[in-house]
């Protein structure tokens, strides 16, 4: 796997892990009972991880200029 793909995978995995932790806390507290409803925020956290990767790449590119 190319290094950039590993980097993207790492950021998305971290985002998904945070999403899963958040969803399990919401489920344990009884705030959200429908398991399928929790899938949306988990996906959003994964996309947020992808966005953080993009921002990191942009900052690195700006610093190298």
Image: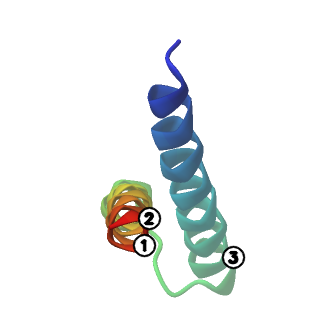
Judging from the image, the colouring scheme is rainbow
* Outermost residue to the front: 65
Q: Residue 61, position in %: x, y?
A: 35, 62
Contact (Cβ within 8 Å) of mark 2 with mark 1: yes
Q: Earlier in the sequence, mark 3 or mark 2?
A: 3
Query: Residue 18 sits in which quadrant?
Result: bottom right
> Which residue is pictured at 59% across the width and 83% down the height?
30
The residue at the point 46 percent across, 41 percent down is: 8
Q: Image height check: is 57 above or below 33?
A: above
- Image point 37% across, 68% down: which residue? 41
Q: Earlier in the sequence, mark 3 or mark 1?
A: 3
Helix, strand or loop status at disc 3:
helix
Q: Which residue is mark 1?
A: 63
Q: Secondary structure at mark 1?
A: helix
| 3 and 2 marks in contact (CB < 8 Å) | no
Q: Is residue 30 left or right of residue 50?
A: right
Q: Which mark is residue 10?
A: none
Say which mark, if any, is on residue 60. Answer: 2
Choose mark 3 or mark 2, whichever is in front.
Answer: 2
Q: Return the residue at label 3.
A: 28
Residue 5 falls in image quadrant: top left
Vertical order, 5 against 59 (above or below): above
Q: Quadrant of residue 52?
A: bottom left
Q: Say few, some or many: other residues with alpha carbon within 10 Å of mark 2 (under 14 / 14 to 19 / 20 or more).
A: few
Q: Residue 27, position in %: x, y?
A: 59, 73
The answer, for residue 49, to whether it is visible in the render is yes
Task: Name the spot of residue 4 as percent of width and height, x first.
Answer: 46, 32
Q: Position of residue 57 (x, y in %)?
A: 38, 58
């Amino acid at each position: 796997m190319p290094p950039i793909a590993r980097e993207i995978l790492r950021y998305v995995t971290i985002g998904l892990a945070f999403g899963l932790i958040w969803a399990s806390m919401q489920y344990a507290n009884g705030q959200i009972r429908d398991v399928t409803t929790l899938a949306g925020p988990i996906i959003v956290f994964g996309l947020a991880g992808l966005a953080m990767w993009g921002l990191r790449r942009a900052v690195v590119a700006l610093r190298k200029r």
